[in-house]
Image: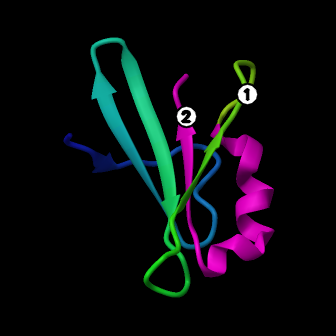
Amino acid sequence: MAHAPSSSAEGPAHGEVEYALARPDGLVRWRLRRADHAPARGTVVLLHGLASNLSRYSEFVERTRLQGAWDLLRLDLR
């Protein structure tokens, strides 16, 4: 699966990298924040509801203690 770094109006949280994948039916975007301490215990996937977007979890990603041991992935399927 090919992907490339991307950018949007509301930028990635500290330590996050944003990616985008162009598909015939639209653009899929995601942001990934790697755990502070490698290796990560796993990945927490944050999905928003139909009427929202990946910014729904911006504050959570910035403040959660999970970022110490877990990779955090915010996915935007809109």
Residue 28 is one of the magenta-drawn residues: no
Q: Nearest the camera: 40 or 53? A: 40
What residue is disc 2 on?
A: 76
Q: Over which residues does the magenta segment extend?
A: 54-78
Whichever of labels 1 and 2 marks the residue nearer the N terminus, that label is 1
Left or right of residue 1, residue 12 in this image = right
Q: What amino acid is labelled 2 in the image? A: Asp
Which of 53/39 is in front? Answer: 39
Q: Does residue 61 appear to the left or right of 8 in the view shown?
A: right
Kindly indicate the quadrant of the structure image that contains residue 27.
top left
Q: Which disc number belongs to residue 38?
A: none
Please tell me which residue is depicted at 73% across the width and 49% down the height of the picture: 57
Q: CA distance from mark 1 to mark 2?
A: 9 Å
- Which numbered marker is on residue 52? 1
**Helix, strand, or loop for circle 1?**
loop
Label 2: state its secondary structure: strand
- Residue occupying the point 49% across, 58% down: 32
Q: Quarter of the image holding residue 22?
A: top left
